[in-house]
Each structure stands twice: as structure tokens, then as C-alpha cells.
Image (spheres, helix red, strand yellow):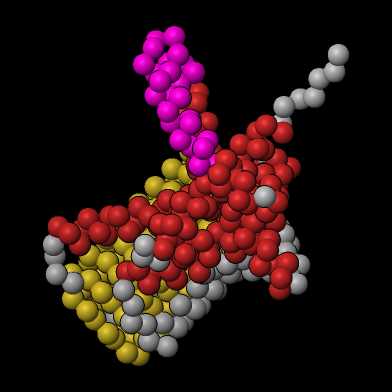
């Protein structure tokens, strides 16, 4: 199948292909430097300044400044970072977004890349179609399917079944749009990793707030709106005095945390409702990913997306406020 897509479509596909597969477990790792030296027969989510995969894994979702894949991956690879190097075979599909991307090995299925600089080396082989959007693209490998390239500069010494090339004109607006697009992709991946880590590290309080989202949505929206406005006003008033400045900082931190987690709670609730209606049997993190992807797609709808984003933030923040109030320890006497 030949791809003809714009950059918004690329973002959409990157999010859609994050849908969970039928797996039994999940391995998450994060840190300043994440190095996988032991084989993991499971799906891996890794985030850090540098992520290095030196042992086989089932599938990989990674985000970081530098990402190196030096061992075979049985399933799919989804990665976003400053520099990404694929140096080992991948049996599934590959979706990459970054500053500089290098493909040095074989990919069993489709390849989708959005980056500033893309290099497909002589040792790279793509088993199906490839869609590349970048400022500069160098193709010296083999694409057994269709190759679609959108770039300002394109050099090709490789082979493909069919080539479709669109030249992009250099402009400041397009450069800023590309940076903004990459930033949105990285931020979305970071939010997804944050939600998965919250479910894994603190499942009980997270699921308690998620249940509150579904129990009284209208009350949550009103409480969330009041909490956001009240927190901003109270924080500003307290920040005007030196005595109240520490309290204002704490209020600001709680407000930021609530706003970050608000859409994550709503994502889990949306996924729960969809899974329940369809009669599927899934885990909490799978429900979260389903709802998260659908919400991210909805947020990008012109005009309507902004309304949905505002409602989701108020809904999740209201549930977050009630969740904090329910955490107060009971006292007697």
C-alpha cells in the first residue's frame, strides 16, 4: 500500500499504532541512562537521557535524547528522541520521530519516520512500505514495497518497488512547524509513559481517582473549574507576600501535578467504558492506552478539540481534588 500523507497524518498514525497488543505483562524502565543488557521476553517502555538496548526484547517503546537499538526486537519499535540508531533486526513495524535517524538493519514490516535527518544505509532492508518525512533523506538500502519521501533534500542510491518523492520548500514557518510537531509527539509520548508509570507504581490511588471520574462527571467538571481558578487566584495572592510565598509555590506545584494527571485519569475512564461496552478483557494499562490514543486524536480536531481538552482537564482535575480529600486519614476522639 502506497502512503500519501501530510505531517498531521504522521502524528495520527504514531498515536494509533501505540494501541496495546495482547500481552501478559509490561516492563517499564526510566532513568538518566537506561541500558538493557539482559533479554526481556516482554514489552518494554523505556525513557531517559540515553536508552541503549543490548539484549533481545519483545517490543520497544522508547523516548530519550539518544536511543540505540543493538539487539533484535521480535515485535514493533516506537521511539522518539534526538538521535535514534537502529542497528539490529526488527521483526515488526518501526515508527520513529527525532532529530537524526539512522537505519542500519532490517525491518520486517512498514517503516514510518519523521525527523530532521534520515539515513537509510546500505545494510538496511524494509520488508514492506516506508514513509519518510524529513529535512534531508539519504537512501542507500532496499525497500521491498513502496517508498514515499517528503523532504527538502533527497539522495537515493538504493532500490524500491515504487518511489514517490515530494520536495518541500525551505521556510522559517515550516521549520517552526516541524519543531512544534516533534515537540507535540515527544510530549504525547511522555504523557503516555507518565500514565503507565503511575498505574504501575501507584495503582490503588490512581484507580480510585479514575473511578471518581466516572461516578459524578458533572460535579467533577464544576469542581475542577473552580479548583483551577481558585488555585490560580489564591497562589497569586499568597505570592505577593514573602510569608505566603512558600505556600504559593506548593499550591502551584499541586496545580501543575493535577493538570498533568487530569487527562490521564480521563483517558483511563474512557478506555474502561469502551472496553466494558465491547466486552473485552484487558488490563488497566491497556484501557489507559486505548482511551489516551482516542483523546489525543480528539484533541487535534480543530476548535472542537480545544473544547474537549478543556472539559477533560476540568473533569480530571475535579476527580483529582476529590481524590486528595478522600486520602485524609480518619481520626477519632
**Foreground residue, 326 or 23?**
326
Count the marks: how many? 0
Residue at x 43% of width, y 31% of height? 232
Q: Main secondary structure of the magenta part?
A: helix
Compared with residue 194, is residue 173 higher up or lower down, i.e. above or below? below
Is any atom of residue 141 visible in this view? no
Quadrant containing the C terminus is top right
Compared with residue 267, is residue 208 higher up or lower down, i.e. above or below? above
**Foreground residue, 133 or 161?**
133
Q: Is residue 128 magenta?
A: no
| Corner quadrant of residue 150 | bottom left
Is any atom of residue 164 visible in this view? yes
Residue at x 60% of width, y 64% of height? 290
In the picture, measured across the screen, residue 267 lies left or right of residue 137, that is right
Compared with residue 45, is residue 155 higher up or lower down, i.e. above or below? below
**Foreground residue, 197 or 320?**
320
Q: Residue 20: image x %, image y %?
A: 62, 66
Quadrant containing the N terminus is bottom left
Residue at x 61% of width, y 51% of height? 218
Residue at x 59% of width, y 61% of height? 291
Q: Residue 125: image x %, image y %?
A: 41, 77
Q: From this viewpoint, which residue is outermost toward the right?
A: 333
Question: Magenta stretch?
Answer: 224-248
Q: Residue 258: image x %, image y %?
A: 54, 38
Amino acid at each position: 500500500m502506497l502512503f500519501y500523507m501530510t505531517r498531521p497524518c504522521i502524528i495520527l498514525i504514531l498515536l494509533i499504532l501505540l494501541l496495546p497488543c495482547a500481552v501478559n505483562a509490561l516492563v517499564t524502565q526510566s532513568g538518566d541512562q537506561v541500558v538493557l543488557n539482559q533479554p526481556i521476553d516482554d514489552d518494554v517502555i523505556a525513557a531517559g537521557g540515553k536508552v541503549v538496548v543490548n539484549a533481545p526484547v519483545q517490543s520497544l517503546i522508547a523516548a530519550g535524547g539518544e536511543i540505540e537499538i543493538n539487539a533484535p526486537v521480535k515485535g514493533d519499535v516506537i521511539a522518539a528522541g534526538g538521535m535514534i540508531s537502529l542497528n539490529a533486526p526488527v521483526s515488526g513495524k518501526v515508527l520513529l520521530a527525532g532529530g537524526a535517524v539512522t537505519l542500519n538493519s532490517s525491518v520486517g514490516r512498514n517503516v514510518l519516520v519523521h525527523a530532521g535527518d534520515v539515513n537509510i544505509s546500505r545494510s538496511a532492508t524494509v520488508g514492506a512500505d516506508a514513509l519518510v518525512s524529513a529535512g534531508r533523506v539519504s537512501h542507500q538500502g532496499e525497500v521491498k514495497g513502496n517508498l514515499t519521501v517528503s523532504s527538502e533534500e533527497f539522495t537515493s542510491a538504493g532500490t524500491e518497488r515504487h518511489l514517490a518523492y515530494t520536495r518541500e520548500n525551505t521556510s522559517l514557518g515550516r521549520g517552526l512547524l516541524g519543531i512544534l510537531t516533534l515537540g507535540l509527539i515527544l510530549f504525547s509520548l511522555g504523557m503516555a509513559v507518565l500514565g503507565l508509570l503511575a498505574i504501575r507504581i501507584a495503582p490503588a490511588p490512581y484507580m480510585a481517582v479514575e473511578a471518581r471520574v466516572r461516578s459524578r462527571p458533572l460535579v467533577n467538571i464544576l469542581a475542577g473549574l473552580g479548583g483551577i481558578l481558585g488555585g490560580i487566584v489564591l497562589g497569586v495572592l499568597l505570592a505577593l507576600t514573602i510569608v505566603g510565598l512558600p505556600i504559593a509555590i506548593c499550591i502551584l506545584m499541586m496545580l501543575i501535578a493535577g493538570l498533568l494527571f487530569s487527562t490521564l485519569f480521563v483517558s483511563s475512564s474512557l478506555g474502561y467504558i469502551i472496553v466494558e461496552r465491547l466486552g473485552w478483557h484487558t488490563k488497566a494499562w491497556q484501557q489507559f492506552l486505548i482511551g489516551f490514543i482516542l483523546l489525543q486524536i480528539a484533541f487535534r480536531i480543530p476548535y472542537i478539540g480545544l473544547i474537549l481538552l478543556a472539559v477533560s482537564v476540568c473533569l480530571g482535575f475535579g476527580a483529582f481534588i476529590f481524590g486528595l480529600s478522600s486520602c485524609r486519614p480518619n481520626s477519632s476522639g
